[in-house]
Amino acid sequence: MARMMKVAIVDDEEDMRQSVSQWLALSGFDTETYASAEEALKVIGTDWPGVVISDIRMPGMDGMAFLKRLMGIDSGLPVIMITGHGDVPMAVEAMRLGAMDFMEKPFNPDRMTELAKRATQARRMTLDNRALRRDLAEGAQVMGKLIGTSAAMERLREDILDLSQADGHVLIDGETGTGKSLVALALHATGPRAGKKFVVVSCAAYAEEALTAKLFGPVEEGGSLPLVEEARGGTLVLEDVEALSQSLQARLLTFINEQGTPAETRILAVCNAHGEGRTLEDALRPDLYFRLAAHKITLPPLRARGEDILTIFTRMTEQFAEEYGCDAPEVSAQEAAQLLQAPWPGNVRQLINVAERAVLQARRGSGSIASLLMADNEEAGPAMTTEGKPLKEYVENFEKMLIDNTMRRHKGSISAVMDELCLPRRTLNEKMAKYGLTRQDYI
């Protein structure tokens, strides 16, 4: 499950602190309030799981000095500045130093909520990517996270290994939840740039001016390096690249052209534009699109690789069971069929969330996989289809997964498998031989 992000509100005026805190709390945010920058700095450190909203003018350490300290602690920490009407130039300067955005007093509560939402999403992505880099330090470990034996996944792994050795920029396209960020990391970790900088930014999370400063600078005294400089020699990942404004697209194209060939900094452009019926070619100017799409990887949706569903679910329930100190839930033949027939609009991310919730349910001895799927997919579209596969192949894949999963749960007990699947012994033996399954593999 996604980690809960905090919102630290730093202001010397108690009425302002409480007003902001109460409004954000009503919108579902977990808030903390601090009367001074010095007090907040006792709590906020590297990888702090949250964002900061701070007044610019405060006694003692003012907002600008506070911002510089925060950027020195963690340059990826989103900071939103609160400013009076006459302090707008100072707020713009704060954005050049690394602030994500600013609000003028009296602020619009809806705008504040939207900024907090964007900031927490960006922070979550930053921390998740840092965790990935720590946990998956070597390319082989990264590739191991791409679970599945379907033809689509085999092709994806081959594409990653081929393109990781190339110098050209790569466009990574796919539906939400298919694993685009993991593929970006795999491209970096399995190629010659592994061990060099891997820098990620969400183009949708920042206001245009803030994103321009974050990407390109200029560098101010005490501020962090622009991301194009921080990523020099390594990889720069542009999440939600379709959100770039026209002026930023022009700036990015200039940067790419000035690098020459081969590029010193490789750009991996991650796109989800088609999810709203709009292609990336619609969103980007043609010259930038063709530079970013020198190579392209399109991730398959989960419904196009149904034979991987039970494998992923089993792997993740075992992982979560170990994490929570309990047994992984057993999956009956009926539940396996339900997992395979679910539409999975959220793709692998949704499947992983269901696996975690299934473990938590099993730990407290309540609920069912069917109830989880019903809650997740009550407004979803049609169930998984064969996506152009011959029906015979689809049925065989389903049959093999079902027997394999049942044999695993019953630890190779032929009689138990026969009872659950209602199969005569001869039929079960024939199907196991057909699919290369042997009892010894499960004992």
Image: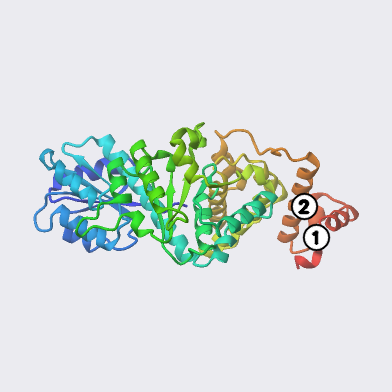
Say which element carries label 1.
Answer: loop
Horizontal arrangement in the rendering, residue 113 relative to residue 318 (left or right) = left
User: Residue 149: horizontal and vertical position, in percent?
Assistant: 68, 55
Would you identify the image quadrant in which residue 141 lies?
A: bottom right
Mark 1 or mark 2: name the one nearer the start of the chain: 2
Q: In the rendered structure, are the residues bearing label 1 and label 2 in contact, judged by CB atoms less than 8 Å apart?
A: yes
Residue 70 point in image, percent of width and height: 24, 59
Image quadrant containing the C terminus: bottom right
Identify the residue at horizontal 23%, vertical 48% (top origin): 95
Amino acid at the residue labelled 1 = Leu
164 vs 432, nearest the viewer = 164
Residue neighbourhood size for the residue with mark 2, other residues' Cα within 10 Å, grouped as few (<14), some (14–19), many (≥20): some
| In this view, 437 is above or below 342 | below
Q: For the residue labelled by badge 2, is the local secondary structure a helix, a strand or a loop?
A: helix
Task: Answer whether residue 83 is visible to the viewer in this image.
Answer: yes
* Front residue (pair 99, 331): 99
Give the residue pinned by disc 2. Answer: 400
Please, is residue 275 above or below residue 32 in the view? Answer: above
Does residue 271 show up?
Answer: no
Q: Residue furthest left?
A: 59
At x 20%, y 37%, the residue is 107
Left or right side of 411 for 179: left
Structural crowding at the residue carrying mark 1, measured as other residues with C-alpha within 10 Å and reported as few (<14), some (14–19) or many (≥20): some
Q: Which residue is mark 1?
A: 437
Q: Give residue 293's position: percent from left, percent from top.
A: 51, 44
